[in-house]
Image: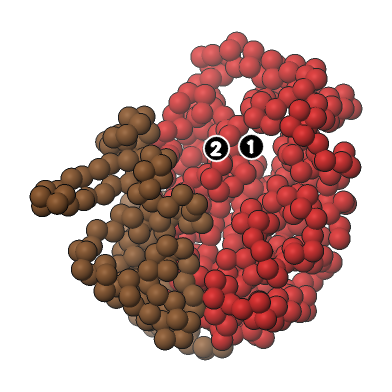
Chain colours: A red, B brown
Amino acid sequence: MIIDDLCKQSGEWLRGAGPMSDIVISSRIRLARNVSGYPFLSKATDDQKSELSHLLRRQVDERATSGQWAYLEMAKADELDQQVLVERHLISRQHADSRGERGVAVSRDESVSVMVNEEDHLRLQVMRSGMQLDPIWEEISRIDDRLEEKIDFAFHPRYGYLTACPTNVGTGIRVSVMLHLPALKLTGEIERVFRAAKEMRLAIRGLFGEGTEAAGDFFQVSNQVTLGRTEEEIINDFKHMVVPKIIDYEHHARKALVEERALALDDRVWRSYGALKHARTISSEETMLHLSHLRMGINLGRMKLVDLKTVNELFLLTQPAHLQKVHGARLNGEQRSAARADCIRKRLASE
Amino acid sequence: MQLGCQACKKAAATVHTTDITPDGEKRERHLCDNCAQEEGVIPKSQPHMPINEILSGLVVQKTTIQQLADLTCPSCKMRFVEFRNSGLLGCVCDYDAFEKALLPLIERAHDGAGHHIGKVPRRLGTPRSAESDLIRLRRELNRAVDGEQYEEAARIRDRIRTLEEQ
């Protein structure tokens, strides 16, 4: 497939553009759907999984697509390729790690991906850079409508769209925004955001998905309630309450840093630049931390030697599977740290 | 104010259990996720943190648990206890077969809600009634006012008026 090509570019959601992109890295919506007449995957036989996979692949191909797509059969895919897709947020870690017939369709610009036979029969995802929930909802709902012309999705008069896990039932919608909150992290006020999110029934995770420590000042906020509210209500909460409020906090904290601790702030930004520019070996965690500071420096106009797009690209290119893919060989931890430092140095030298 | 974990005394307690000792005394425990996993209070490999939180937080009388655990779906043959362990249902019929046990969980997971009011497949052809639209809009209006979103509130108010006039 096109995975080798993918690794050379960074995907729509890391373009560093779109509304509020100084803080909102990307927004995405996922819909969970199951085909009526088939059991959920935990009780599906191999034959049923295979039928579902064929049916869904054909319908996605005919109805969900308007441009060029690639379909990857996970069972036949190279493990490294699977990890690349995880790092690019095109599939879940669970989808890469599970067994049996399953696949993913990815649009050429990577804004749309459709997982087949993940936890539910179908998981549609649309993702864009910056804060763009309205166009995303429009697009994903249209794809859903088109598929529904040919597939009967399991729907219950009381519970709505039925999902394998009852935490997704109803709308089956998961709205997520990825936020860069370095100032709130520095000042320790991020704890307040966590508490407020918990009260609003929102989940907060790290940049690279479920279970990861929110590393390098990047946080993914998503809804947990999927029943008893409309899709628009859930999205509007993000648009009018959650995101503007957190952005407001972050801007406030950044302003305070600039006004009261400018020297310390610049020191941090420029030290990070120095470390990235000269390190000979660097861990993934350290990379994330420095890239985060660099990104904040660029957004506050205190660092002009690097642009946002480069920083965003480096987030992806320095991930383990991407490094190995570009390198063309398996690397152990130590080798990866050296390859990572190399990759960053070359990239920054060409700026 | 959050409770701290009684085991590690560091993280916030997120898992709360009430055991009955053989002497009939209640013993409450408050643990963080890690310690709860270490002590086997919640399963270690967790495909679904949220559902497990909900399951482990549910306090039900022992006899009832036994009855509920034995509920079996006539279609996919899954037993409720299987779902409790995996967090995943076996087929669409489970929603009805397990309703008694499942509904409290669903309501806990979804802020008390037990009815879908969102998108409906077109093939079912019943657009939302004006009645349910009004209920939804009035709730949206309250939220907007609470959130001091006055422009949004005015917009919703106008839509309510239009609907009421029809």
- The image quarter in which residue B110 lies: bottom left
Residue A336: tell me if it is visible: yes
Q: Regarding mark 2 in the picture, which secondary structure is present there?
A: loop
Q: Residues within 10 Å of mark 2 (few under 14, many from 20)?
A: some
Q: What's the chain of the residue with tag 1?
A: A
Front one among A184 and A50: A50
Rendering coords of residue B152 (x, y %): 44, 57
Element marked by disc 1: loop
Horizontal and vertical percent position of residue B70: 33, 75
Q: Are marks 2 and 1 on the same chain?
A: yes
Residue B49: assigned label: none
Q: Is residue A158 left or right of residue A35?
A: left
Of B153 and B2, the residue lying toward us: B2
Q: Would residue A84 be found to the left or right of residue B11 on screen?
A: right
Name the residue that disc number 1 marks.
Answer: A22
> Could you tell me residue A163's position as x and y percent?
50, 71
Q: Is residue A13 visible?
A: no
Residue at the spot 35% in from the left edge and 36% down from the top edge:
B12
Nearer mark to the viewer, of 2 and 1: 2
Q: Amino acid at mark 1?
A: Asp
Give me the residue at 62% from left, 44% from top. Answer: A208
Question: Label 2: which residue?
Answer: A214
Count of numbered circles on the image: 2
Q: Quadrant of the N terminus of chain A?
A: bottom right
